[in-house]
Amino acid sequence: MTDINRTHMLKSLENGIRFDGRNLVDIRQPFDVKLNVSETAEGSAVVTLGNSIVMAGVTMELATPYPDTPNKGGLMVNVELVPMSHKDYEPGPPGIKAIEISRVIDRALREGGAVDFEKLCIVEGEKVWNILVDIIPINDDGNLFDAGALAALIAIKNAKLPTVTEEGVVDYKQKTDQGLPLVSEPLPVTIHKIGNYLIVDPTYEEENYSTTRLTVAVQANGNPCAIQKSGEEPLSQEQISEMVDIAIEKSKEYREILKKFS
Amino acid sequence: MTYENRFDGRKFEETRPMEASVGVVKNAIGSARFKIGKTEAIAAVYGPKEVFPRMLKNPEKGILRCYYNMLPFAGFGGRVRPGGSRRSKEISMVTEHALSPVLDLSDYPNSAVEVYIELPQTDAGSRCAGICAASMALADAGFKMKDLVSAIAIGYVGDKVVVDLDYMEEHYNEFKDENAPKGGETDLPYAYIPAEDKFSLMQMDGEISPEDLKATMDMAKKACLNIYEVQKQALRQKFKKIEE
């Protein structure tokens, strides 16, 4: 990252324009979703946000519940930053970037009460469904938090349970028409701070210049349900309030896309 | 007669429907998507870049490295745990060997060209789909190549030699009609270089007669020439779009 580029970016932001011509709080176009992109998954979706393309796939697993929650199923969110999606990524175990995105999306879904885990219980203390969500960027041009969460939510929303045979084995080849108990739709919105400017839906380049960011997951009623601040620069009370307000406003735009798939 | 009609109604020498396109991963210097039936591969090329470990450096030409990876939800069954397996490592190696004969990397000594192959969904034939996508991606990146590489699996299912097996055919005895006797479940993936009339990948698991084995090569060539047209068409399509 050269400083001259940063200076240029700050100057551009001062004029309210980003390198790709957007306003500071504009979400990129094209912004769209494709369903059922993988027939082997129980549910899947691809979200395109500008040049970022993110795929999410849901697989269902029959498992024994945890002893402390014998009547509840489980949820696992995993992000794989595959080297196909950007030159900076290498093959190998997930690094801190992938782990943070997984955990923030997981927290948004969990704390936002997205899934009714009790409805995933088949036999109390013996058999429950676990929802395994894998999020994979096909082309990473930034904002994997928001695009990944949206893809995950839509994939869960469109997933169908596989059949269970009389012997209690999952037959993945036969899907039922029973969906998953998705009861709320929390949506994370990430606000980045570059210099003194706040932006939404950053490109990969903008993410590299960002000094701090706040991811706020917002419920349909406008209440925040999970937050993550990351980056080395501290934030003032006013800055945080402003970022939360932008997140709530922008979550409505993300929600418009979600509505098309209900 | 044990295998009269294929499970999905195809003719014995017919491949599943194909789709191909290039330029699907903008960050990469070349990329392609190849879909055959419900098997889909996306390949992206990065490089030339530094070689690690350095002992792999070749002072005469660049080296090709391929990484075959099934996405966690791409398996015919439960979740596939991410991270390399013995299977994916071996497939990555045979993919490198299938592609390097057509690729001229003499302009890039001491460096590596990397091809990442990701599979969002699979229904058998995934290494072949991966090779088809990877060869298109390398061409899309603009490397010097003698030709494209096309790949297909030929099989001996029940008592018939068939082209492009799907998952059910690979597990014929599990899915066959109750009355039909047990039969072959033999799978032979081939990669073919049309310009040289040579094969750059051949593997087999299962049993087959020597006559039928030899016959599979003719069928592989025929099927690969069809795939070759689909690949070329996809590459041309990109430049047509640029022209417009």
Image (cartoon, rainbow, N blue to C red):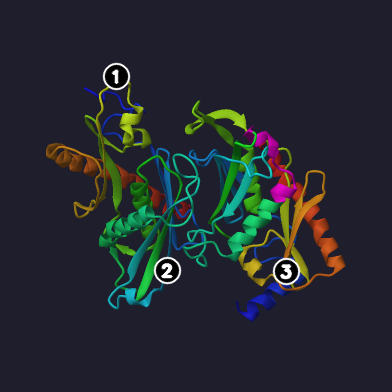
Q: Residue A233 lies in magenta, yes or no?
A: no
The answer to whether residue A112 is visible is yes
What element does badge 1 sit on?
Answer: loop
Looking at the image, is B8 positioned above or below residue B67? Answer: above
- Residue A210 spot, x, y in % from top left: 69, 70
The answer to whether dots 1 and 3 both sit on one chain is no
- Mark 2–mark 1 Cα distance, whole angstroms, equals 55 Å
Q: Which residues are magenta?
A: A108-123
- Residue B128 spot, x, y in % from top left: 33, 48
Q: Residues within 10 Å of mark 2 (few under 14, many from 20)?
A: some
For badge 1, the amino acid type reads Asn
Q: Residue at x 60, y 65 (%)?
A: A96
Residue B218, quarter of the rendered image: top left
Looking at the image, is B7 positioned above or below residue A1? Answer: above
The foreground one among A117 and A157 is A117
Q: Chain of mark 2?
A: B
Q: Chain of mark 3?
A: A
For badge 2, the amino acid type reads Gly
What element does badge 3 sit on?
Answer: strand
The answer to whether dots 2 and 1 both sit on one chain is yes
Q: Are marks 2 and 1 in contact (CB under 8 Å)?
A: no
Would you name the residue on which mark 3 appears? A212
- Mark 1–mark 3 Cα distance, whole angstroms, equals 67 Å
Q: Residues within 10 Å of mark 1 (few under 14, many from 20)?
A: few
What element does badge 2 sit on?
Answer: strand
The answer to whether dots 2 and 3 both sit on one chain is no
